[in-house]
Amino acid sequence: METQFAQTIVDEIYAHMQKQGGKPADWYVGITDDIDQRLFIDHKVPRQNHWFAYRKAASAGHARSAEKVFLDYGCDGGGGGGDDKSVYVYAYLKGPNTEP
C-alpha cells in the first residue's frame, strides 16, 4: 500500500464518508500500527458489506494530523492513542455489531 500525506488521507476518507451520507458522529476514526488487529478484531468491523476505509500515512505525524482533522470535524474516536509506529488511519461507520 502506498503511503500518503495527511491531506490526501483526509480527502480520500472524507469522500468515502460522504458517499455513505451519515453524520460525522456516526463514524469512528483512529490510528494504529496493525490495521487488521485494530479494525477487524478490536473494533469488530465486518470485512464485507460495511462502510470503512483506511490509508497508510507517510509517518505517524501525518497519521495523527489526519486523525485530528476528523476528530475536530465531529467524528468519534480518541486522540492520543497509538505510538510512533501508528501510520494507518482508519474510519468506520459505527453499528450495532462494532466496538468503539
Image (tube, rainbow, N blue to C red):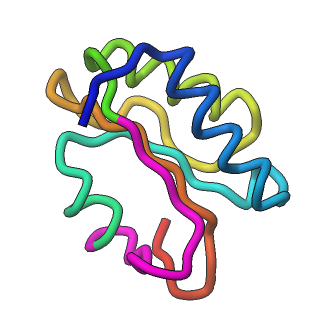
* The quadrant where residue 57 appears: top left
- Residue 66 x, y percent position in the rendering: 51, 23
- Residue 90 x, y percent position in the rendering: 44, 46
Query: For the view shown, which residue lies furthest in the front direction?
Result: 2
Residue at the (76%, 61%) spot, across then down:
20
Query: For the view shown, which residue lies furthest in the bottom direction?
Result: 97
Vertical comparison of 24 with 59: above or below = below
Magenta stretch contains residue 47: yes
In screen coordinates, is 56 left or right of 76?
Answer: left
In screen coordinates, is 68 left or right of 31?
Answer: right
Q: Nearer the viewer, residue 11 or 73?
A: 11
Residue at the (73%, 60%) spot, across then down:
26
Q: How many marks?
A: 0
Q: Main secondary structure of the magenta part?
A: loop
Q: Nearer the viewer, residue 90 or 4?
A: 4
* The quadrant where residue 68 appears: top right
Residue at the (63%, 50%) spot, across then down:
76
- Residue 100 x, y percent position in the rendering: 49, 65
Vertical comparison of 9 with 22: above or below = above
Q: Nearer the viewer, residue 9 or 65?
A: 9
- Residue 74 x, y percent position in the rendering: 75, 39
Magenta stretch contains residue 42: yes
In screen coordinates, is 40 left or right of 7?
Answer: left
Quarter of the figure with the N terminus: top left
The magenta region covers: 41-55
In screen coordinates, is 65 left or right of 12?
Answer: left
Vertical comparison of 37 with 97: above or below = above
